[in-house]
Image (cartoon, helix red, strand yellow):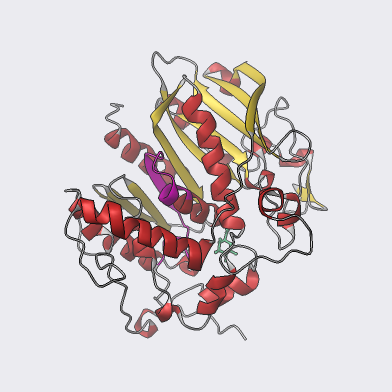
Amino acid sequence: MIESANYDESKVGDYTLPNSLKCEDGTQVFDVSDWVTKRRPELLEMFAREVYGRASGNQIVIESEVVSTDEEALDGIAVRYEIAIFCGGKSNGVRIDLSLYLPKAHSKPVPVFLGCNFNGNHALENSQSIPLNTRWMRNTADEKSVVGNRATEFSRGCESTRWPLQLIIEKGFGVATFYYGDVEADHPDGWKDGIRGVLSLNEESTQFNGEDWGAIAAWSWGLCRALDYLVANPAVDEEKVSVIGHSRLGKAALWAGALDERFAIVISNNSGAGGISLARRNFGESIQSINENFPHWFCGNYKKYNNSAETLPVDMHELASLIAPRPLYISSAQEDLWADPKGEFLAGKYAEPVYALFGKSGLGVAEWPPVNHPVGECIGYHIRTGKHDVTTYDWQQFLRFASRHFRITQ
Ligand code: GTR
């Protein structure tokens, strides 16, 4: 039985986090070299083995093709490209449909935010020129946008408030996005038609081993394939691609950013449990409840910790540390208690010693800041008023943070 979630700070209790700077053999990490050559690989391995699962090592052919170009997107301020990324062949593989928006007026390669969306590329703006995504989708609460697990015409633009495209373009950034279900549908059998099916398994009856990848790792894998495309596109500044994700897609963005150091900045929005919030804090969503509600998200081994977060060999401050020395932004929402906003902040806080190895300062504050007071140097953080969502306020902070780190003057 899943115990009901605790929302009382006084009942969080004591916990001891694993020491990020102590290797498994007991040796201490003193400098960047110890971190890079020993501790970082060790932590990556533990996160793969015990939390997200290891992506299949099978190699497949990845091909991409620009399907269409709209030179007058967003009332003429952007060019939008629809790109098909074929993973494992055009007929038997997985096809990721990437939408790429670039500012129309740009004299040099553009910094880009890459993130998965929840409802298809057509959900970002109300434009008939974007094909309606026809893949399996979670039904929406409005009972109109997604019906019978398929998107309807009504869903055009339904995710637009989460992607303030005009604002992002006007600040000189591009946006690249794809529907996460292109990689794998978000349900326990989704792998059968997704990349995990294509890459790791031959028969439907094949079981996953404890350390085989779950759906979150599959979505992260998709983000890395989209990044492959972006870094090869001369219009994109390959050194300035930031990965962003909200909620379950924030978990995927973090794991992609941890694995793939080509991501220049990692942004976790309300990623919560199994994302950036500390697993050992007894607050909001627990390991047990996430594993029972979403058995396909994490690897089999993660279920060992359903009732014993304290035995997990890692915690999420170490996921944050895996991003170092690259800038990391963590955003929380005041009403999003399920995601444990304070636990999200603390993961950033306890990642500071690793940033310090690189001579980088982290959050720049000792205490959890009040709402709507963004803080941070190399680790940015805010908690805003409101609920679990991505808002224009969030994006304003991401844009400021990325502009500062990329030295873009607004
Ligand atoms: C919730 C889940 C969270 C978060 C969220 C979302 O139901 O418990 O961990 O991922 O879904 O993705 O919106």
40 in magenta:
no
Above or below, 292 against 105 in this view is below
Tell which residue pokes out farthest to the right in this image. Answer: 148
Instruction: Look at 68% across and 56% down and name the residue there.
Output: 186
Highlighted range, magenta: 256-277
Foreground pick, 182 / 147: 182
Classify residue 276 by image quadrant.
Answer: bottom left
On the question of residue 290 being in view, the answer is no
Instruction: Look at 47% across and 80% down and name the residue there.
Output: 6
On the question of residue 209 being in view, the answer is yes
Classify residue 156 by image quadrant.
Answer: top right
Instruction: Look at 66% across and 54% down and name the residue there.
Output: 200
Foreground pick, 87 / 306: 87
Image quarter for ligand 1: bottom right
Residue 103's spot in the image, x, y percent?
48, 21
259 in magenta:
yes
Q: Is residue 68 left or right of residue 205?
A: left
Residue 392's spot in the image, x, y percent?
46, 42
Q: Is residue 152 left or right of residue 105?
A: right
Which quadrant is the N terminus positioned in?
Answer: bottom right
Instruction: Look at 67% across and 41% down and name the residue there.
Output: 120
Above or below, 298 against 327 in this view is below
Residue 136's spot in the image, x, y percent?
76, 49
Which quadrant is the C terminus positioned in?
Answer: top left
Above or below, 36 against 312 in this view is above
